[in-house]
Amino acid sequence: MKNEKIIPFKNNEGISFALTQRLLKKGKKYGLNAIFPFGTDKIVVAEWVHIKCRYGCNRYNTNWTCPPATPVPEKARLILGEYSLALLLVGSKNCTDFYLENGRKRANQVRCWKGTISMERMLFLEGYYKAFSLVGECCALCKECAYPEDCLFPQEKRPSVESFSIDVIGTLRNLGATSTVATHHCQDFNYYAIILLE
């Protein structure tokens, strides 16, 4: 997605401005350019997102971080109900290789993935013991996922935002943001991750 208008940071969401700034400094090393705290009641979980994964993605039933290895929408709603706070992580990139399966695209995916997981770890060490990441895009830690055999990186295995049945555009709208989909592979586009907190 491109050209989003994101709501300004409000220091009333249960996480300090200073910690958010430290997280952003760390995140910039991984390509993130904004972090916004918000209440999990703004997250939209939708059945249609799960259907899109099942019928519109070649990763379905081939990856530990995609359905059916991730929670169904009903279970995702229950899990989200155990959290009150989330961080929206926003990065942007221009990836002319978006529709190709090559090393450069994979390296970018791994960089974003590791950045999100490292911020989750940082939050855990700050006392947010329930911190859990929903990562942008699909997992690319392995060139080919070992699924259904044991994951080679179980400590870094996390579902993607979409595989958790989260309607990203609907969630952005709930946050007062506007979004448009990039329609050409040469356009910059935003990608999103979410870290759940309590």
Image: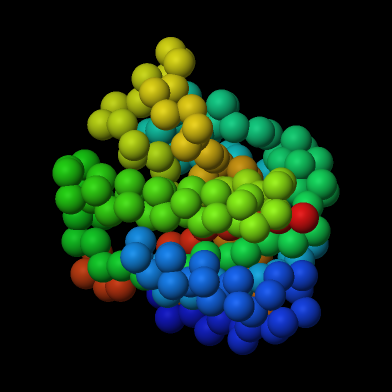
Residue at (52, 67) in percent of width and height: 23
Total residue callouts: 0
Image quadrant containing the C terminus:
bottom right
Image quadrant containing the N terminus:
bottom left
Placement of 26 over or under 97, stated as above or below: below
Placement of 2 over or under 47, stated as above or below: below
Which one is in front, 75 or 146? 146
Which one is in front, 46 or 142? 142
Residue at (55, 31) in percent of width and height: 67
Left or right for 20, reference 109: right
Residue at (19, 61) in percent of width and height: 96
Colour convention of the picture? rainbow
Residue 117 visible in this rendered orientation of the protein: yes
Q: Quadrant of residue 11?
A: bottom right
Left or right for 7, reference 66: right
Location of residue 162 in the rendering, given as x and y in whole percent from the top left corner: 55, 48
Left or right for 5, reference 79: left
Residue at (76, 42) in percent of width and height: 79
Location of residue 15 in the rendering, given as x and y in whole percent from the top left corner: 71, 70
Location of residue 123 in the rendering, given as x and y in whole percent from the top left corner: 61, 56
Location of residue 75 in the rendering, given as x and y in whole percent from the top left corner: 75, 35
Q: Quadrant of residue 2?
A: bottom left
Which one is in front, 118 or 10? 118
Which one is in front, 76 or 142? 142
Residue 182 visible in this rendered orientation of the protein: no
